[in-house]
Amino acid sequence: MVAATPAPPIRTARIALFAVFGLNGMLSALWIVHIPAVTQRAGVSHSALGILILLMAGCAIAGMQAAGPLADRLGSRTLTATAATILSVALIGPGLATSPATLAIALAAFGFGNGMLDVSMNAQAVHIERAYPRPIMSAFHACFSLGGLLGSLAGAAAQRAHWNIHTTLLLSAALGLTLVALCTPRLLPHEPEAEPEDSDTESTSRPVRTVTGTSRKVLVLGAIAFAVLMAEGVAADWSALQLRDRLGVQVGTAALAYGAFSTTMTAGRLVADRVSGRFGRVAVVRWGTVLGAAGFGVIAVSGWLPLTLAGWALCGIGLSGAVPQVFTAAGNLGSANSATDMSRVFGLGYVGLLAGPAIIGWLTTVVPLTTAMVVPLVALLLCAWGARVVATH
C-alpha cells in the first residue's frame, strides 16, 4: 500500500522543482517585457524581429531534441541544473546586444537553453511524480505560469522605475543562478532506466514490438500536444484581435480576452492534479479538450462581450490540464529512453504552438478571423477522441 505522505526528500524535491519551473516562467517573461527596449537598442525592425524570434524557436526545438538523450544518459537533475544555468546567463545577452547580429546570437543561446530546460525539468517532474501517491504534474506547470506573471510584473516595474536594462537582466540572471545553486542538491538523482534483460527465447521478438508500440504512442502523444498547444498559441496571439475584430471594442477591452484565458488557465492548473487524481488522466484530457472546443464554439458564434469573454475563459480552463497529462504519459511509456520520448513529444507540441497562430493568420486571408476559430475547435475534438493514449497503465 502506498503511503499517504511521501518521504521528506521527495517533498523537498517537489518544492525545489516548483522554484525551477517558476524561474523558467520568470526568465521568459523578463525577455518578453523587454522586447521593445532590446529591439530599439539593437536597431531591429519588426520584420527582422519576426525572423529572430523564429531563429530562437528553432534553437529551442534543437535544445529540446538534445536534452532528451542527454537526460537519459546523465540524469534529469544534472541536465536541469545545466539548462537553468545556461538560460539564466543567456538572459543577459539580449540586453547587451547592439546590432541584429549580436541579438541573433543572444536569442539563439536563450532559445537553446529554454528548450533544454523545458525537457529536463519535465523529466525531473515525472521522476518526482512517480514517488508521489497522487498526480502533481499540473502544479509544476502552474508554477511556470505564476513565474511568468511575477516576471512580467517585475520587468514592468523596473521599466517604470527607469532601471537600466543591463541592471535588470543582470540581477535577474544572478537570481536565477542563486536559485539553481540552492535547488539542484534538493532535486532527485535520476538514474537512467535500464532495458529489461531479454531471455534467449525472447531476444529476437519482444524488443521489436516494444519499440514499435512506443514509437506509435510517442507519435499520437505528439499529435495531441501539437493540437493543444496550437490552441494555446491561437489564444495567446489572436484572442484580443478576435474580440476587437468581432465586436469592435477598444484596445483595452480587447485585452480582456487573453486575460480571461490566462487567468482560468493558471487557476485550472492549480486544481487539475486533484481532478486527475479523482477521475484519471484520460478524463482530464478528454473532457478538458471538449471544454476547450466548446469555448471556441462559443467564441465563433457570440456577438456579446460577456459571452465571448466566457468563451475564452472556458478555453483556458479546458486546456489547463491537458498538456501536463500528455507530458506525464510521454515520460512513463516504459522505455529506457523516457526523456528522449518526452523531447519528441515536446518538439511536436512546440511546433504546434508556433504553427497555430500562423495557420490562423493565413486563414484570415480567405475567411473572417472568428470563422478561423473552427480550426482549433476541430483539433481539440480530435484530441478528445484520442485521449485514451495518455493512460499510464
Image: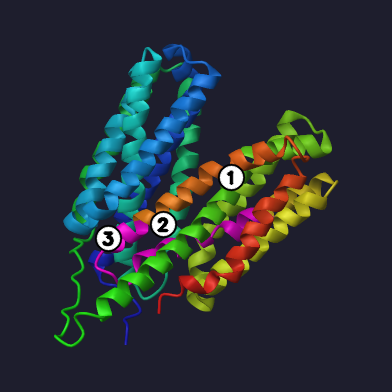
Which stretch is magenta? Answer: 314-342
Q: What residue does disc 2 label?
A: 345
Characterize the magenta stretch by its predominant secondary structure: helix
- Position of 349 with respect to 69 (left or right) is right
Ranked by sequence position, the earlier of labels 3 and 1 is 3
User: Of label 2 and label 1, which has the lower sequence position?
Assistant: 2
Q: Residue furthest front?
A: 204
Tell me: residue 287, above or below residue 293.
Answer: below
Spatial separation of the CA atoms under disc 2 and disc 1: 16 Å
Residue 330 image offset from top left, x and y in percent? 39, 64
Circle 1 is placed at which residue position? 356
Quadrant assignment for the C terminus: bottom left
| Helix, strand or loop status at disc 2 | helix
Q: Residue 51 placed where, x, y %?
A: 47, 26
Q: Quadrant of residue 204?
A: bottom left
Q: Is residue 329 magenta?
A: yes
- Three-letter amino acid code of the residue under disc 1: Gly
Q: Tell me which amino acid carries mark 3.
A: Thr
Amino acid type indicated by mark 2: Val
